[in-house]
Amino acid sequence: MILQDLYSTIWRLFSSSPETAAQAALHDDHTAPVQNEVLRKARPQIVGPDSGPEAPFPIELSGAVQRGFGRGGKDLGCPTANLPDESLPPISSVARTGVYYGFAQVSARKDGSKLLPDEDAKVMPMVMSLGWNPFYKNERLTAEVHIMHDFKSDFYGHDLKVIVLGYIRPELDYVSREALIQDIQTDIKVALNSLARPAYEKFKSDPLFIRSP
């Protein structure tokens, strides 16, 4: 409990006047706090109220999966699906940059043909990074979704539906790729822990998601 209180206090200091992602996009300086051992040890293993998502959540996003930088799976062992820029306003206008959790579904069909197995088209837990990825010095705001599932093939161009249910942490910079990977693995655990509660798990059946034909 002491570590969790410390973590909350530190983030309040970092985010005393939090900007939405859209506001931050107007600035040239996209610096972020550097992760350190104090912050890492203070991270809670579950986030968000047990009673369920609070405003501005849930937030629905959708769009065809775009080709990104190709770093997620190759460099970080965490493949991601990029949402198109035009799908971002629902979250970028009300939320800060950082890491979020929720559920996602990839359509099995593309251009009228069924290309993915039913197993790949289920509603699955996800973590999403919204921001500038300061470690890689991105020049534009991106939303990168990591779906907790082992897809056997890529799904570029397939429709992706996402429901964002909560905020895990602010965007950070890192002193090494290994430190970034360690935080990503913690993000995944936090997301799974947080989504396992009944008030969040019920969103797997949200009308946003479609059944595979």
Image (cartoon, rainbow, N blue to C red):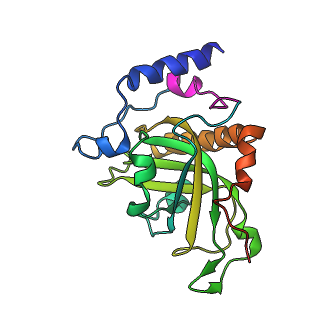
Is 55 displayed left or right of 140 in the figure? right
Q: Quadrant of residue 13?
A: top left
Q: In this view of the protein, can residue 212 be seen by the observer? A: yes
Q: List x then y, in percent, for residue 205.
A: 74, 55
Q: In front: 8, or 111?
A: 111
* Residue in the picture at 57% in, 22% down: 42
Q: In front: 33, or 52?
A: 52
Classify 60 as above or below 168: below
| Residue bounds of the magenta highlight | 37-50
Q: List x then y, in percent, for residue 102.
A: 62, 48
Q: Quadrant of residue 174?
A: top left
Is 10 displayed left or right of 17 in the figure? right
SS majority, magenta = loop
Q: In front: 176, or 93?
A: 93
Q: Does the magenta stretch include residue 39?
A: yes
* Residue in the picture at 54% in, 45% down: 181
Q: In which quarter of the image is residue 35?
A: top left
Q: In this view of the protein, can residue 77 be seen by the observer? A: no
Q: In which quarter of the image is the C terminus?
A: bottom right
* Residue in the picture at 71% in, 30% down: 50
